[in-house]
Each structure stands twice: as structure tokens, then as C-alpha cells.
Amino acid sequence: MSHQAPTDNFPLPQDLPPGLTPELMQWVRDQAASGLAPTVLLHAMRDVGWGEEPARQALSLAGMTLPSTATPAVSRQPAQHLPEPDLEHQPCSIDVGDRQVQVLVSMDHPRVVVFANLLSHEECEALIADAHPRMARSLTVATQSGGEEVNDDRTSQGMFFQRGETEVVRRLEERIARLLRWPLENGEGLQVLHYGPGAEYKPHHDYFAPHEPGTPTILRRGGQRVATLVIYLNEPALGGATTFPEAQLQVVPRRGNAVFFSYDRPDPSTRTLHGGAPVREGEKWIATKWLREREFR
């Protein structure tokens, strides 16, 4: 079936619908110019996290006509399966092979579970000691380009371990895989972060925003993020809680404990907006594990 060629008459930036940028529209235009049929491009955009309606708007603005039999509109595509601890019988603790991890809090929406005893005090100290010489100003994912960038909202220092890089990292990753019933290879490398007095990470989402031009590049490494596990390696004297503003929930750091939350789609409806409150006194060390849909490479 033939399809209409993209037009050169693009709207000015101020005329674009919310969520669409000139960079995104140029990407759509480039894909269309390569000869992809509108329906093929629509499915490709949905596969990397675009909502149906923004994708259709972008294609329409690019001068591409979709047939009326195209897939009905939906706001976001949920993941088919998510990391999830086995809480069916409301256990007080979960056997992860080499220790019992206690369940302290379980919330459905947002999906949040707080664990105790995920790490021993000695393991926490070992992670801090191994990470300390490699700490640098924390970066965030640059969704405009798919790279990394300094973000004023994040004033911590951090570093990444490769999967299985040390004995403690390997043991922890295997423990997490059993606890959350998610393949070890679907996890990003463990990130260790250090927050000094006054340092914070303002509320944000961990998934990759579907409409940013750099997101397709990021998703090639393992798909969307679908869950986060924040592990507390020490206890600041004051402040430093992990906050979920929409749920009015604060998780206070306790060494060896962790907070898990998952998000079935890259959308604010998951209510997983969260942040690291400022450290008021002392310092905070955490380790973060992000889980992807597929194997992370």
C-alpha cells in the first residue's frame, strides 16, 4: 500500500501540541523519509514508549495519513510482567537463599514495598569502602540525547559497579533477583550514591520519558525501566528520607533496609514520583538498582 510522503511544512515550535518538540518532529520526519509506512512507524513508536495519541499527532503533523483501522488509542502501554516479591500469603519475611529479608510495609498504589535486613552491616560497609575512591558528581540520564548530564536537582556524588564486579555486589545482585523474582541480567549496574549535608535529589520519575528524543537510544540497551530498589547503606543523623509526595509517604533510611517500587508504564499515573529529601545532619549512603524490561547490555 502506498502512503503519503511527509510534508516540508512543519509547524513552528510554539504551534506544537504539548509533549512534542522540534527535535522529536525532526526524528519522525527522518523516519518517515526513510520509507516506513505510517502504520509501521506508529507501531515502532508505541514499542519504545510513545502514547497512542501523541504518536498519531506527530505522524499527522509530519503529513502521514493513518488508515481508520489502526489500533484504538490508549494512553500508555503497560508492561506485561513486573518485578514483584512473593507476598501472596502475606509473609513477614522472604527467604532469599542466604538470609531472611523482612517485609515492613506493602502499598499497592503506588506499588511500594519496604524491606529490612537485605544487607548486613558488614556488607554495607564493604560497598561504601569499595565505592569511596571512585565517587564523582552524580549525573542523570540526558533524555534529549540519550547520554548523561549534570542536573541541578541532584546534588549527590556517585559511581556505578559493573554487574558482579565484587563478591559483595555479586551476592547482593543474586539476592535481589531472588527477592523480586526478576532475571539478574535485566538489572543495570549497581549505583552507589553519597549525600553530604544539604544534598538532595528533588522529586522525579525513574522511567524514561517516552516523548524525549533520546529515549529510543536509551531503550535499545534493555527496554524501559520497570522498577527501582533503593538500599540504605548507613543512617544520617537528620533528614535524607526517600519521599513519595503523591502517596504522602516517607521512608526513613535504616542501614541494610531497602525500598522497592515498580511502575507498569512510563506515565505519572503510576504515582511513583519520588525524591531524596535533603540531608540535615550527617551523611547518607545508598545503593540503587534499576530493573529493565529485558537484558541490560
Image: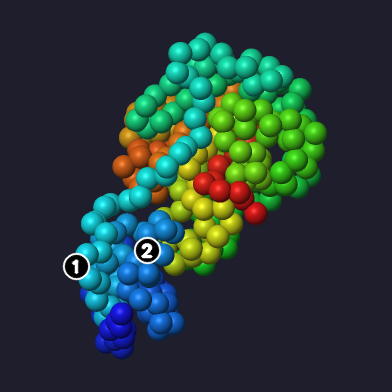
Tell whether 11 sits left or right of 156.
left
Residue 187 in view (yes/no): yes
Above-or-below relation of 233 to 207: above
**Residue type at mark 1?**
Ser
Location of the C terminus by quadrant is: bottom right
x 76%, y 22%: residue: 122
Whether residue 268 is situated above or below residue 88 in the rendered picture: below
Q: Out of 59 and 188, give the one closest to the viewer.
A: 59
Mark 1: few/some/many CA within 10 Å (<14, 14-19, 20+): few
| Mark 2 / mark 1, whichever is N-terminal | 2
Between 235 and 145, the one nearer to me in the picture: 145
Residue 195 in view (yes/no): no
Local secondary structure at mark 2: helix
Residue 268 place in picture, x, y as percent: 34, 45
Quarter occupied by the N terminus: bottom left
The image quarter containing residue 175 is top right
Disc ID at residue 43: 2
Q: Label 2 sits on what residue type?
A: His
Question: Compared to 262, does 149 lie above or below?
Answer: below
User: Residue placed farthest to the bottom in the image?
Assistant: 8
The answer to whether 115 appears left or right of 172 in the picture is: left
Using the image as rendered, state which of residue 116 and residue 245 is in the foreground.
116
Which residue appears at 57% of the width and 35% of the height? 182
Q: Position of residue 159 (x, y in %)?
A: 68, 47
